[in-house]
Amino acid sequence: MANTATNTAISNLVASQVPEFIRSDYQTFVAFLEAYYEWLEQQGQTINVTKNIGGYFDIDTATKASIGDLSLDIYIQELQKNYVRANSSVDVFVQELQKNYISNIPSTVLVDRALLLKHVKDFYRAKGTEKATNFLLRILFGGDAGNTSFYYPYNDVLKASDGKWFIEKSLKISDTYIDSNPVTDNEIIKTAFKNTLITGNTSGATAVVERVDVYYDGATLVKEIKISKQTKDFVSGEQIFTLYNDKNNVTHTLLANTFSGIVNRVSLLNPGTGYISGTNIPVESNTGNGAIIQIGSVTPGNIKSVYVVYGGAGFRQSDPVIFSGGGGTGANANVSVVLSNNYYHPNSYNIAYSTISLEANTPINNTVYSNLNSSNANTAIGNALSYFAYSNTGPAVLINMISGGNNYLTPPVSAISANTRVRELGILGRMEIKSGGTNYQIGDKITFNNVFLGFGTGATANVTNVNANGTITEVHFQQVPGFPIGGLGYDAGYLPTASVASANGNGANIVVTSILAQGDILKTTSDKLGAIQSLIIVSGGAGYETPPTLNLTAYGDGTAQANATIVTGAYVYPGRYLDDTGKISTYSFLEDRDYYQKFAYVIKLNRSINEYRSYIKQLTHPAGMKLWGEDIFRDDYLATNTRFISINTSNTILVTGTYVATGNANGTTIKITTQRSTSGISNATVEYRDGPAVGNLSNGIFKVTPNSTNAFIFVQSQNTINGSGNVYTRIY
């Protein structure tokens, strides 16, 4: 602060302050006063000291060569007269100020003490605030405090009815105009409407436009303006207008047509059964279009029963029923009754177990056949083969439900699992008389012809009963030598055609319907399985003048019923909570006396609270609050100019430097250039404090190898233990 005539001199103003008659009659007195004030303006006198008082208490000035015309030595002497003992240096003066004003702040802070003293008044003014606490932590820990954050546990305390409920409204628009000129650029529409007050030409309703959303609803481009502060109700199809200023501050009129008639709600009247989640329901209307209503959730359940639609052929009692699909598990059933009266096919079969594939490599004259203790070249092949009896068979009649299972969403597919060997043989098992014709006789022969891609052989049948008109009423398969009754090798997917050879008969239609041990058709039933629980509006469509009809008769059991309602004017979205506050099932906690309460706060810092608790309590802690600390230290926290704490059994070293990390077979190698000597160190525990993760670096025991005067290499060991037996040591 330099002395100038304008800021220190008063003597030159004396004459102008003395009355005129004194200046005229007592000039000597005026000169005396001027000389007196000139003396007061000299170095060290009252006026000089007063004018420079600010410099005396500016710590920055204490380190400068002079203050005005006052030399540093004289300045210090003057300060010593009032504040410190004789022969004290500037450092001692600063120490005295520190003793009086920042005694609770440690002398090891990472900032200049003079600078701290200069601004300590602002620090104390901010006491109790996050700003003051952040400042304190920064001067204590430097860069380590750069990621400090504050958390107030009471923010996560459960508060009843504290959720923020929001109901969103919108208008869908089309045919947008600016000053009667059509606008097709969606970005212009978004910008022009935003934050304007729109008015309905017909209704007189007004609303503020929050934003404009442009999106496709199926193949339809939709422009939807989200509104708030609505007054009155908008009318469907009315024109809205507003004024807006372009980038050149020119005012324009913005017009658009609204359209509504949107399906906004569906009500379930009858849930029905047997419906499948995700099914789209037909929406029927003579006016609007585009609505998509979908079955949401349905009730899970168990299988009540399984009944036989068609019994197939060749099943036996206790054959299991296999269930697949439906989403549930545990259903169990079996065949309880079969029709074993020989009407459709024989009750019993004698089926050769041996086949060409099994006996192809069997020598005839010197090896035991399947069915004989011994054999020779004269043994009949038929006598040498193994046979098994497949008896008490017939079409399935009844199914016994053992267990209904659980959690089925749709009726599962069910089928009888018969003897696998019999199914593979491809024996024709059942015929149906679609038309009996006339003039047929008992004994007329029925032959079977393979269709395209079909195969099989050895099947034949006869007409076994006719009525008075010669109409066929019963047919049976017949034995062909070398084949089971019904032949072999037929495919259920390519069943042969049947034709009746008769001298006089005509018009008969006989159809082969199943292979032995196949051909069943079953249906499962349930009391509540697939009952509709919810309906989802995928798209509300538009333009509906009356509510559309929801047709549920084509799905499930056809008994479900639902109604739709439409909205005209502004569309009101279902209300929603903006957050989870107040919800008991969310991340909220009950209030307690220590942590989750109004007067607690948490400092999150990659330092232990033991390092700063006392300083916070003494300097920035708000009275009545409870302090908590959360250590956000990361083991892999590493970066350039990283601070390491290195420990061995004999000493502790704080290392600050840069690193280069490379991987090798023995672990991770880190070359660090430091600012202090590393001589005498052989093994050290390293803790990474700052910076992002690099490679696979982690805390642990490292072998130290000198590299140069101010550099050494850490090589990470695998299972090394230091002298105290600790693999990892953390220091604060």
Image (tube, rainbow, N blue to C red):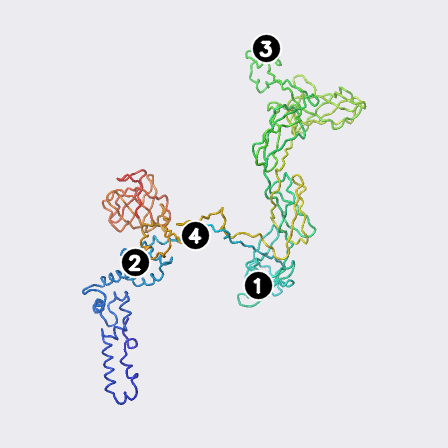
Q: Residue under circle 2? A: 111
**N-terminal-most mark, 3 or 2:** 2
- At a point 73% along the width and 20% down the height, the residue shown is 462
Q: Is residue 18 left or right of residue 168?
A: left
- Farthest residue to the bottom: give it: 25
- At a point 76% along the width and 24% down the height, the residue shown is 472
Q: Amino acid at mark 4?
A: Tyr
**Closer to the camera, 428 or 687?**
687
Instruction: Name the secondary structure under disc 3.
Output: loop
**N-terminal-most mark, 1 or 3:** 1
Asked if the residue under mark 4 is in contact with the one under mark 1, i.e. CB atoms within 8 Å, the reply is no
Q: Residue under circle 3? A: 377
Instruction: Report the mark closest to the observer, 1 or 4.
Output: 4
What's the distance in space between the residues labelled 3 and 2, CA to CA? 113 Å
**Closer to the camera, 410 or 480?**
410
Label 2 crowd bin: few (<14), some (14–19), many (20+), radius 10 Å: few
Q: Residue under circle 1? A: 197
Q: Residue under circle 4? A: 154
Instruction: Report the mark closest to the observer, 4 or 2.
Output: 4
What's the distance in space between the residues labelled 1 and 4, CA to CA? 39 Å
Asked if the residue under mark 2 is in contact with the one under mark 4, i.e. CB atoms within 8 Å, the reply is no
**Count of numbered tags:** 4
Q: Is residue 551 above or below residue 142?
A: above
Instruction: Name the secondary structure under disc 4.
Output: helix
Asked if the residue under mark 2 is in contact with the one under mark 3, i.e. CB atoms within 8 Å, the reply is no
Q: Amino acid at mark 3?
A: Ala
The quarter of the image holding the N terminus is bottom left
